Image (cartoon, rainbow, N blue to C red):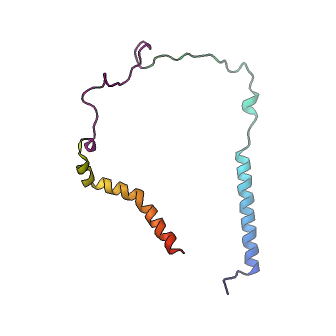
Amino acid sequence: AGFRLPISRIMVLHRLLTALAAFLFVEGALSLQLTAAPFLRPATATARRTVTPTAQFGGDGKQPRGISRDSEPEEFFKTNMDEMTDAEKLKSPAVYIGLSILVLPFVVGMIALTLAK
């Protein structure tokens, strides 16, 4: 037949699991408690004022400052991969490492599921 646990062990496991579930429930309930202290502050304790947005990074705020095609400098930041052709990029081991990190977990999972049947 199959593997059977004695009744005493089953009772001990049941008690441990019940205690663990009760502990987790109590901890979860305690973490959700709200205190009334933030809601009991008098209304005059904090004065609210409205602040209008201002241009913080220079300019008069009328023209948007940023990079556009017209204002972009000729020399911009480029990585070495940006300068490579597609054939040169495929010769890089970084491409194969990245693709294998994406694909191999699924292949291993399919193999494991096939062998588990």
Q: State the image coordinates of residue 18 (x, y, percent, origin top left).
A: 75, 64
Q: Say whether residue 55 is magenta.
A: no
Q: Residue at x 65, y 18 (%)?
A: 48
Asked if residue 42 lies left or right of residue 90, the reply is right
Residue 32, quarter of the rendered image:
top right
Which residue of the protein is positioned furthest toward the bottom in this rendering?
1
Point 74% across, 63% down: residue: 19
In the rendered image, which quarter is residue 33 located in? top right
- State whether the magenta stretch is mostly helix, strand or loop: loop
In the rendered view, would you say 6 is above or below 52?
below
Across and down, in percent, residue 56 comes to 45, 19
Q: Is residue 110 left or right of residue 50?
A: left
**Residue 84 % position (x, y):** 23, 45
Query: Total of numbered circles in the picture?
Result: 0
Q: Is residue 112 above or below residue 31?
A: below
Above or below for 58 versus 85: above
Where the N terminus falls, by quadrant? Answer: bottom right
Q: Nearer the viewer, residue 4 or 29?
A: 4
Query: Range of the magenta residues?
Result: 57-82
* Spot occupied by residue 109 in the image (x, y as percentages of width and height): 48, 65
Residue at the image position 31 percent from the left and 53 percent from the top: 94
Question: Left of 62 or right of it: where is 10?
Answer: right
Q: Name the quadrant of the C terminus.
A: bottom right
> Is 75 part of what is drawn in magenta?
yes
- In the image, 54 versus 96, the foreground residue is 96
